[in-house]
Image (cartoon, rainbow, N blue to C red):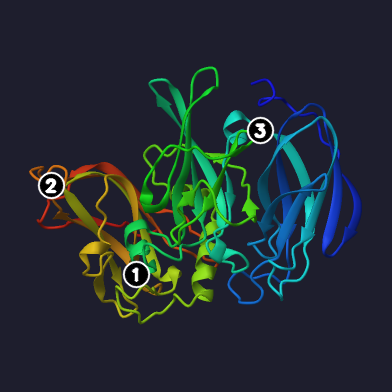
Amino acid sequence: MRVLLAALAAVSLVADSSAPQREERTFQIARAGDVQLTLRARCAPCDWGVSGREATVLKISIDGKYSQHVPLVRGDERADYRVVLGTLDAGAHRLTIERDPKLSASGAGGFAIDAVTTDAFDMAQAMAPILYARPNTVGRFTDVPLVMWYEVAPTPRGRQFRYSVIFSNEDGGTPTDRLMATWGRTSDIEFVYGVELDDAGRILAEEFQGPGHEVPPFRGRHEGRHPLLWVSTDNNMVSESGPTTIRYALAPERADLRDVSREAVMDRNPWTYAVAAKELIREGKIDAAAPPGSGRIPDPREFVTVEACTELQAAAISVGVRAVDSDGMARWHESDRGLPEFRVARTGCFRAAVPVPSTSSPDALRFRAYSKPDRAAPTLAGKVVLTRYHIFRLGPDYMPEPRGNVGGGARDIPVDGEPVEIPIPRNP
């Protein structure tokens, strides 16, 4: 415990050498402990949405030993990339940052490091999983892990740390148009690893989300206290072993998701929306005329995203947005677009995105509930209670604009009945 929570003294960083493709820095730590690295980096020619210029990928080494890769997915933006370096001994260490030519886009060029800082970990960060790349993503700029977060849940024996990852997209699993309808985004968000601890910090149990969304006990290898996991399916499930050596060690942030959806972590990192959108553009998944069920969508900026919290059982729900066209005509637009599989069938807080032309002005929402028998309890009556909602759009930069019309107060949504309409007040 003392080592895991050890405070590090102020860090002194000195540039040893500098070149367009490689930098070396030295730093000092006062006591052995788990260390986090933040790189403020940019790549002027990089553009995640343009083939051949997607990203420069940095290879990070500590004292001559490979640590991980860091794709500069945010282009020329001076952006912070936070990663785990693991446990380091007290004293001086050499950090090597170099462009990996095999993994970098041919037109991406070099990189610039504006700042390098290190800091100590808390226990939850020191137990974060290290992810190895899925084989068919290596060098292909797809399904990249962008953000890791953890939640803390009490258990009868202590507490559990639960780690989840936001990937830039998913090449398999839920098609893009259904992702927008039922999750309100095109990134892929997955729980990857959980660890239960007693009050003394001893590990009681570990688990991971494997292929088929099964959650078996984790019995794989660790590096220090970090479990090693391999992304192994096209919808980003993980396994305890794999063939790749390229890895990512994201430093996790803590999140409290009570009364909000998981997508709230994306709101805290709005750049993730832009990266996800650019990947769609590059992969040809944007098509204004694509019919529902095609797997393609209109421009993500042509959607109104609705977050709603419900108490739901044996039912599914869809969301409608009424918008006034430029000619003054009002028209309803639906999240399910007439397809039952595009409806949300989970209780709690969720998001659904409704395709609405950006030239239209939304003035009302409606929620419609449909019966959906529960296989485990087929006699359970359908019920939906709406407790909270808000809406937003993506701006010209593909990042969320300020939220609109945050509303609350419980109201019943009749199952297989008339929808409940809610006016959207106009901005003053």
Q: Which residue is mark 3?
A: 121
In the figure, is residue 215 to the left or right of 112?
left
Question: Image quarter for residue 223?
Answer: top right
Q: CA distance from mark 3 to mark 2?
A: 46 Å
Of the two numbered discs 3 and 2 on the same chain, state the one appearing first in sequence: 3
Q: Are marks 1 and 2 in contact (CB under 8 Å)?
A: no
Amino acid at the residue labelled 3: Phe
Give coordinates of residue 336: x percent, y percent.
Answer: 25, 65
Label 1, residues with CA under 10 Å away: few <14, some 14-19, many ≥20: many
* Residue at the (38%, 21%) spot, across then down: 156
Question: Image quarter for residue 112?
Answer: bottom right
Give coordinates of residue 327: x percent, y percent.
Answer: 31, 80
Amino acid at the residue labelled 1: Pro
Of the two numbered discs 1 and 3 on the same chain, state the one appearing first in sequence: 3
The residue nearer to you, when weighing 210 against 417, is 210
Of the two numbered discs 1 and 2 on the same chain, state the one appearing first in sequence: 1
Q: Which residue is mark 1?
A: 355
The residue nearer to you, when weighing 427 against 100, is 100
Q: Which marked residue is nearer to the observer: mark 3 or mark 2?
A: 3
Give coordinates of residue 373: x percent, y percent.
Answer: 13, 50
Q: CA distance from mark 1 to mark 3?
A: 42 Å
The residue nearer to you, when weighing 394 against 243, is 243
Q: Quadrant of the C terminus?
A: bottom left
Label 2, residues with CA under 10 Å away: few <14, some 14-19, many ≥20: some
* Residue at the (68%, 66%) spot, across then down: 103
* Kind of element beneath mark 3: loop
Q: CA distance from mark 1 to mark 2?
A: 27 Å
* Residue at the (49%, 71%) spot, across then down: 280
Q: Which marked residue is nearer to the observer: mark 1 or mark 3?
A: 3
Q: Which residue is mark 2?
A: 382
Q: Which marked residue is nearer to the observer: mark 1 or mark 2?
A: 2
